[in-house]
Amino acid sequence: MIARVTINVGLLRPLLSLAVMAGLLAGCATFMPSDSGPAISLPDPPKRANQVEPVQREHQRILAAYGGAYRNPRLQALLQSTVEKLVAASDRPDLRYRVTILNSPAINAFALPSGYLYVTRGLLALANDTAEVASVLSHEMAHVTAQHAVTREAQAKQASLVNRVATDVLSDPQTGAQAMARSKLALASFSRSQELEADAMGVRTAAKAGYDPYGATRFLTAMGRNAELKVAKEDGRKPVDFLASHPSTPERVKSVTSAARQLSAPGTGSRDRQAFLAATDGMTFGDDPGDGYVRGRRFIHPKLGITFTAPPDFALDNTAQAVLGMREGGAQALRLDVVQANEGQSLTEYLTSGWIENVEPKTVEEFDANGSPGATAIAKGQDWTFRVYVIRSGSDLYRFVFAAKNRAADVEKVFRESVLTFRRLSNEEIAQARPLRLQVVTVQSGDTAERFAGRMATDRPLDRFRVINGLDAGAALTVGEPVKIVVE
């Protein structure tokens, strides 16, 4: 018997919208504070025997959450060598670290007080030289050496106590709300100061280790551009999050640039670009086929053996829980997930079983989706109308939820056409399914960004080519220099 999930249609639209944004923003996250994420497997991390098991459990949880470890011996060796240089130049040369590359397209790095370090392959794909990666690693090491995790935990406990007192003791709701707001703001500000402190410490350590101190400036700039590529507000304005746990990217760029200028002028220190790019050549880019992947409007999952194509003007995001999509302008959205089918329950019964609220029974009808049985119905919310489809394929039940602000015949037609693209993959298609990968090529005479963009197997190829190569719009390429492209 499968667990029944109830979806409140009144909450579904914000859920879809926020989930899409969160999924997209996950690919452009800043370096995380050490207590918010994983770390890497070091040699003999714990000092006491009873610490080994908890550390290894945490390691396994991290691997499970980020698609496991990504195997690339050449890149692993380069990162480990970089870490050793940084440790020798740090304030705590007695600590030991070892890096784990996570098989995730997200752009992130984590550290734990135990000295474990993690970096995603998505972050490595965005970087363009060892100095940039050194800035990330030294930033995470700074969180450990400055004991930020310990101080943040104490601060969080204090904020929690304030919240509890405000809720349980204070009789005046307004006073309680103000107290909780103050404690939350204090905790957020504290976190922001930690990030800026770790940035400055990281720049100093990287420079002392012989790396270009401006690597942090370049990488944070690339992260900002990648974020703009992922998410763009309709009116062109950026949302301001006063309680953001990290400083904004422009603020951090300004901070690390100032720290670098105090150490040396641009052009000093090692960048080690050639060796780094050579180590990333052939690395998986974007989603791993084992988890399904997006190609434009098309979603393909070789392991499940299914595919479908989203409606025109939809952008898809593949998350661990579901495939999410939103149309340009935000007036339409979709979600696709899969649950185990109950053999004793018909599809029409499932639609009205309470899985989703406010289903209109008179709208329930059956249909055929390329040989697979399906059923559909309409559910209504306050401001949105939801067209729900369920398709049985083997022992699985695929659930499509399309949301629209304005229900119209042409919108219904577009949704149905998209669902009818759902089908089983052939054995040949499954065998041919391959991830995108980075290819490092040398710039030849006459090559331009536009010409390389023509070889890119991604969305917005020209913009993405510039972002992953750290190039400004209109920047000329240098003959003989390596650049990255994304190919199938």
Image (cartoon, rainbow, N blue to C red):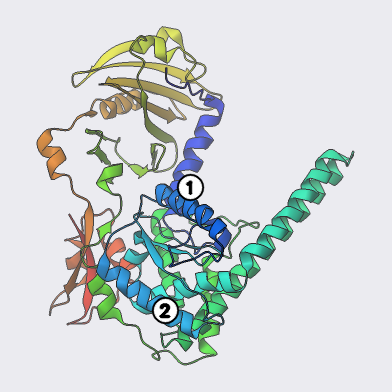
Looking at the image, is mark 1 or mark 2 earlier in the sequence?
1
Of residue 340 and residue 30, the one placed in the foreground of this image is: 340
Q: Position of residue 475 (x, y in %)?
A: 29, 76
Determine which quarter of the picture holds residue 274.
Answer: bottom left
Q: Residue at x 30, y 50 (%)?
A: 287
Of residue 357 and residue 111, the one placed in the foreground of this image is: 111
Secondary structure found at label 2: helix
The answer to whether marks 1 and 2 mark residues whose Cβ atoms lie closer than 8 Å is no
Circle 1 crowding by C-alpha within 10 Å: few under 14, some 14–19, many from 20: some
The residue indicated by pointer 2 is: 84
Secondary structure found at label 1: helix
The residue indicated by pointer 1 is: 22
The residue at the far right in this view is 171
The residue at the far left in this view is 428
- Is residue 382 found left or right of 283 in the rendered image? right
CA distance for labels 1 and 2: 34 Å
Q: Residue at x 36, y 49 (%)?
A: 67
Determine which quarter of the picture holds residue 429.
Answer: top left
Q: Which image quarter is the C terminus in?
A: bottom left
